[in-house]
Amino acid sequence: MKKRIIIVGDSFSLGVGADFPPFENLNKYAPTIKDSWLADWHQVTEGYYKDYVLRQEDPRIKENESIHERLSELSREYHAWTKEVFMTDYFKLWKQDNDGRPTSNDLKPGIHTGRGLAEHSGTWSNQLQSMLQDTEVINLSKPGGSMATVVSALSTYINMYVTDDRETLVFFQAPDPARRHVITSEFNKTLDYEGDIEETSVESNFNNKLYYIQDYNIASMRKLKPSADSQDTYDIGSFNKMYIEKNLYIGEWYQNIYNMQSICKANNFNMAWCTSTVPVSDIIHNAKNEYPNVMDIDVRFDRMPHNIDKQFVSFTFKNEILGIKNANYKEIMSGCRHYTAKNQQLFAKFMANSLITNEDFWWQK
């Protein structure tokens, strides 16, 4: 029987960074980043990972703060540039040089963003699909998605499209705890730059459902609108502060892991999960009391891949270790501080091999 893998999570599990560097695909009217930026990025990221390896070999070596500062500086420059690219009025610039009506390609910035990356060939899930002959790989992840969004995405997809009894594995990458989501009743579809996907396609219909969900990061947002065209703005600064200081996200975080387990159980799906960046030991042992399971919710730690691979302590850590092991220092990290297509290929190969050699772990309830 053909198998199915459904991936749910945030930007890391979606594969953000797979189109890096995107400079060759830019719209001809798009602003450009400075000429030396990419060479600087490769040099600094190479130094960043070399510094990490040195400190692992000799704990007495202190962290090179100047490299970290320079990495942050270059990353801010990249994000500022991408914002300019997306804010550019391509229609206005195109009309200055052309007559008639532009095609959708004429107005694309040339950088992939959001759920459009689900179609990009360089993402690890699409590369994984090319490596598995009789397994369908579906990626429902959403950049910036909260835990509740991840759960909503899976249940929505199941209700829309899962009509058979195919053996299914849900690979769940649990997002950062400090994220919230708002579901608005107003349809708020933003301009889709990611590709000419037919409106009747599965991907398009599913994406349209997700446009009702507005995610935000508790740690970085004070003002909140329930939808982009809303006239109301809510000041949630005091709530955000307490949410972080008092660890109010803990109950919801564990509850949503349990909800994911319950959905899989109800649908007779197999499930495995990992964290995004938080080391699994910080959750299981909770030495700093940052992740207390105060309600004793039945979270399945036995369904985490660190049980078969000690280096799989988080999704991001496993990706970085694979790049470091392959001496791929310059091509591990993308400008948005996710992972390049080349590094995602390493992760896809790892997953393909693990799914085969550790079949008893992955394909169990």
Image (cartoon, rainbow, N blue to C red):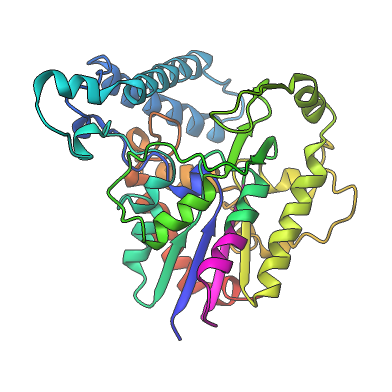
Question: In this orientation, does residue 178 appear?
Answer: yes
Residue shown at 58% from the left, 77% from the top:
360
Image quadrant containing the C terminus? bottom right
User: Which residue is outermost to the bottom?
Assistant: 1
Q: Residue at x 50, y 55 (%)?
A: 140
Q: Quadrant of residue 169?
A: bottom right
Could you say which is closer to the camera, residue 351 or residue 192?
A: 192
Looking at this view, is 322 or 96 the one in front?
96
Residue 29: x and y in percent read 19, 22
**Nearer the observer, 283 or 185:** 185
Residue 94 as seen in the image, left or right of residue 306:
left
In this view, 120 is above or below 113: below
Q: Residue at x 55, y 48 (%)?
A: 315
Up the image or down, 109 lies above or below 362; here it is above
Q: Specify start and end residues of the magenta stretch as a single range.
A: 154-174
Q: Nearer the viewer, residue 356 or 324?
A: 356
* Res 318 visible: no
Could you say where residue 223 lies in the image, as x and y percent from the top left? Answer: 66, 20
**Labels in figure, total:** 0
Q: Does the segment drawn in magenta span residue 155?
A: yes
Q: Position of residue 26 (x, y in %)?
A: 22, 30
Q: Quadrant of residue 343?
A: top left
Q: Is residue 137 above or below residue 29?
A: below
